[in-house]
Image (tube, helix red, strand yellow):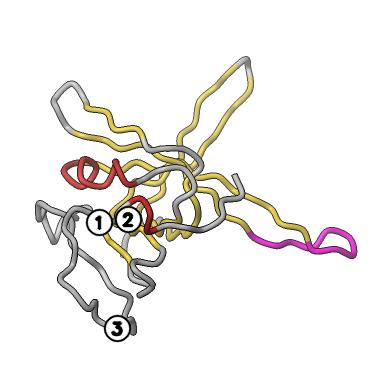
């Protein structure tokens, strides 16, 4: 069995996603996700945040980038890689996530649905347009799934950023 480095994140976008293209015309969507956890410091529990840079490639990047705006709650599944470099004589390191799947989380018309966008992997290939996704025990939507993604007013959460 080979090595494995998998990341699963659920958090909020810290800024609007940036859609760019490589010299060969390949789309890449860059965004950052903040996750939080409570840790005990002394006698108190405090919230600590971590910030993760994420890249989503190809047609999925083009499809989802317009919906990835600051403060949105997202779930990301992908592969981790560690970038290392030297700056001012100091060794630096950053973990980056290459997304295989991105889901926008939040309510859609009060039904609690989500919209998923999968990056085609080695076994699935590129499937073109985004595919709607439902959690395993979520009720089916009352109307046909929207292919264009969620409307801006579907996310009414208070944003801490």
- Image location (x, y in percent) of residue 119: 22, 53
User: Circle 2 sits on which residue?
Assistant: 102
Q: Which quadrant of the structure image shows residue 59?
A: top left
**Depth order, front residue of 103/158:** 158
Q: In the displayed image of the protein, which residue is found farthest to the top? A: 88
Looking at the rendered structure, which numbered label has been put on residue 9?
none
Give above or below for 148 relative to 86: below
First in residue order: circle 1 vs circle 2: 2
Looking at the rendered structure, which numbered label has been put on residue 117?
1
Secondary structure under the numbered disc 1 in the rendered image: strand
Residue at 63% across / 22% down in the picture? 90
Residue at 63% across / 17% down in the picture? 89
First in residue order: circle 2 vs circle 3: 2
Report the magenta residues as a range. 37-45
Left or right placement of residue 156 versus residue 43 in this view: left
Give above or below for 85 relative to 150: above
Secondary structure under the numbered disc 3 in the rendered image: loop
User: Circle 3 sits on which residue?
Assistant: 139
């Amino acid at each position: 069995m080979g090595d494995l480095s998998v990341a699963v994140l659920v958090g909020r976008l810290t800024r609007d996603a940036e859609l760019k293209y490589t010299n060969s015309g390949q789309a890449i969507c860059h965004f950052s996700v903040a996750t939080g956890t409570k840790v005990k410091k002394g006698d108190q529990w405090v919230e600590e945040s971590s910030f993760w840079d994420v890249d989503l490639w190809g047609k999925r990047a083009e499809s989802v980038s317009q919906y990835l705006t600051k403060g949105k709650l997202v779930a990301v599944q992908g592969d981790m890689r560690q970038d290392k470099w030297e700056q001012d004589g100091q060794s630096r390191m950053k973990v980056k996530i290459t997304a295989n799947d991105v889901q926008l989380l939040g309510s859609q018309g009060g039904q609690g649905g989500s919209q998923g966008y999968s990056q085609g992997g080695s076994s699935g290939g590129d499937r073109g347009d985004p595919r709607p996704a439902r959690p395993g025990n979520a009720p089916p939507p009352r109307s046909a799934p929207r292919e264009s993604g969620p409307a801006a007013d579907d996310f009414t959460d208070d944003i801490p950023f």
